[in-house]
Image (cartoon, helix red, strand yellow):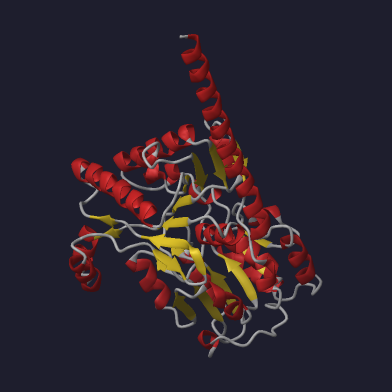
Amino acid sequence: MNDIILVSMEYWGRVWRRNQNLAVGLARRFPSRKILFVTLPVDLSNSVRRGQWRTLAGLAMRGLSAAPPQALEGFPNLFVFAPVKIFPHTLTAGRWANQARARAQIRAAAQRIGMIDPLLYINPYYAAHMIGRMGESALVYDVGEDWSQIESREWLRKQMTDEDELLTRSADAVIVVSSNLERLKRGAARELHHIPNGVYVDRYADVAKRTLPPHPLTQGWRYPVLGHTGTLQSRRTDVGLIIELARAFPHGTVALVGPNSLEAECSRRLRAEPNIRMTGEVDFTEIPRVMSAFDVCIVPQQINAFTESQNPLKMFEYLAAGLPIVSTRINGFRDHPELVHLADGPESFIAAVRAAMSEPAELMGARQQAAAPHTWESRLEAIIAVCEACLERRRAAGAAGTNAEGKLAHAC
């Protein structure tokens, strides 16, 4: 394995998603290799619009330069780096300047920590401009969503689709998280691999046993606790369904645990309900303790082309916890009808919650058994195998080219 530049589309924070789990797994697996985790950029123009004075003060002190890559505590070979974005992307010239600047900053960060021939592992579509410009030894594109299905302005959607298609065609290998994405990318990618998300099974083993110490956030939550973990997003979360559910169980608690990215009006509607609790961001290591207060795990997701392309992390976490699960018929959860109570619409969802609260106890063990093969460790090994195969093919192609040049020179 070579050093790795992993370009992510989120900040490194308390909430861990696929990219953070992958980065830490790679750092553990290859302690002699360096991993550079590139986060979302620090956005100057956005910080000005939002009045984020602390961010602006830090940028000013550094002369609008990025902070040096920071080694993650406990992982001396894993570095986190946030480039600085200066201009609005709505201006074509500004976008080009931002891209050129991002490439230069990432190359400088990689050089600063002594990276050699890094493999470029890209998650966001907007990193397509890096293809062939980062001194990469191979390129892997890890796709988590169908970007063509995002509701946005037509020009922006076309831009996202074009960049996604360019990465798909150019990458040595494309990894997708869902069968829907696999169908979408088939025929366009040179090499295609379906590797879903995973779970740290042992971390959730004691949730349903109620043996974990109670988390302070759960104080005052009343039975039944209908809990959801994960980011609330307008294009995914069914706010109306959540409100109907809360009103159907007025003496219980609907707990929404995780970051809130909803539009302001959606957030206002949820907060207006007296028995809905929105915790905000919770450290991923504390999630099992919070889940220990749940009576039912809920998945009130919209069903649309965008959510159909995804592979929800919470599916494996809920299964590993063993608790009763109620979900709309979204991708992933509907693959386990014997373990998940599926619902269509608010009335059906409410009825499914009532059924889940009186389900047979043996379903807990069945869920945990279903989660057992889907560990992050097994996913990591599959991803490593893809990366190493890409590197080997590049090396073989380079050696063949060198031999051909040598034969030509000898003939001359």
**Residue 293 x %, y %:** 61, 82
Residue 354 vertical position relative to residue 97 in the rendered view, above or below: below
Q: Is residue 91 left or right of residue 278?
A: left
Nearest to the observer: residue 239 or residue 219: 219
Q: Is residue 235 visible?
A: no
Residue placed farthest to the bottom in the image?
Answer: 220
Q: Residue at x 62, y 54 (%)?
A: 380
Question: Is 93 on the left-hand or right-hand side of 376?
Answer: left
- Residue 368: percent from left, percent from top: 74, 67
Q: Is residue 182 above or below residue 324?
A: above
Kindly indicate the quadrant of the structure image that contains residue 367.
Answer: bottom right
Rendered residue at 74%/62% (across/down): 372
* 152 or 368, nearer to the observer: 368
Q: Quadrant of the C terminus?
A: top left
**In the foreground, 110 or 85:** 110
Horizontally, residue 109 falls left or right of residue 312, namely: left
